Image (cartoon, rainbow, N blue to C red):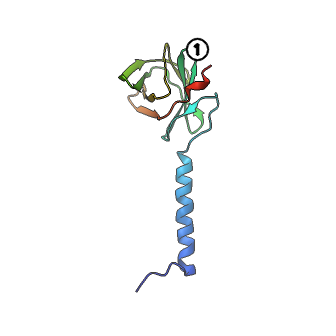
Amino acid sequence: MPLRLSSDRWRWPLAAAAALAACAALAHGDWKPRHGGLMNDGGETSFELVYRHGGIVAHVSDHGVPVDTRGSSPELLLHGRSGTKVLKGTAQGSRVVFDKVSLAAVDRLDLRLTFANGSVAYGRFPGLPVAGKR
């Protein structure tokens, strides 16, 4: 017996499944930047990168709530034309700071944050709008 999707019997289950999928996508969704920076692609933990005065500040949050980064080990992986550089940062409250960073428009960044309890958060930044440096 063929399945008829045009019947009313299937409309509500399909609509409920679509609504559930949309809610799941929004639950892990992209938060709007609060500090004028660039947000990472998806993930539980959100990173907002702000490039100022030759350095990068990454504000860390989980579903919009700031995350304490004290005791963590932040690393910034800078993928450029000349290869990949790993930069060490310092944790300061709900943000991590990377000093003396020079970026080009073709660079890609990955931020890896290893918390004091051993858990790891990872953020990917595929394209950088560095023309508006502050």
Number of marks present in the image shown: 1
Q: Quadrant of the N terminus?
A: bottom left
Q: Residues within 10 Å of mark 1 (few under 14, many from 20)?
A: few
Question: Image height check: is 31 above or below 70?
Answer: below
Q: Residue at x 47, y 35 (%)?
A: 126
The three-letter code of the residue at mark 1 reads: His
Q: Residue at x 52, y 52 (%)?
A: 24
Horizontal side of residue 40 vs 134, given as left or right: left
Residue 129 place in picture, x, y as percent: 56, 29
Which one is in front, 14 or 83? Answer: 83
Residue 99 place in picture, x, y as percent: 50, 14
Q: Residue at x 49, y 23 (%)?
A: 104
Look at mark 1 in the image and give the residue it sits on.
Answer: 53
Horizontal side of residue 22 vs 119, given as left or right: right
Which residue is outermost to the bottom? 1
Which one is in front, 129 or 78? Answer: 129
Residue 35 place in picture, x, y as percent: 64, 27
Q: Quadrant of the C terminus?
A: top right
Say which element carries label 1: loop
Which residue is outermost to the left? 83
Q: Residue at x 40, y 25 (%)?
A: 80
Which one is in front, 1 or 52? Answer: 52
Question: Image height check: is 19 above or below 81?
Answer: below
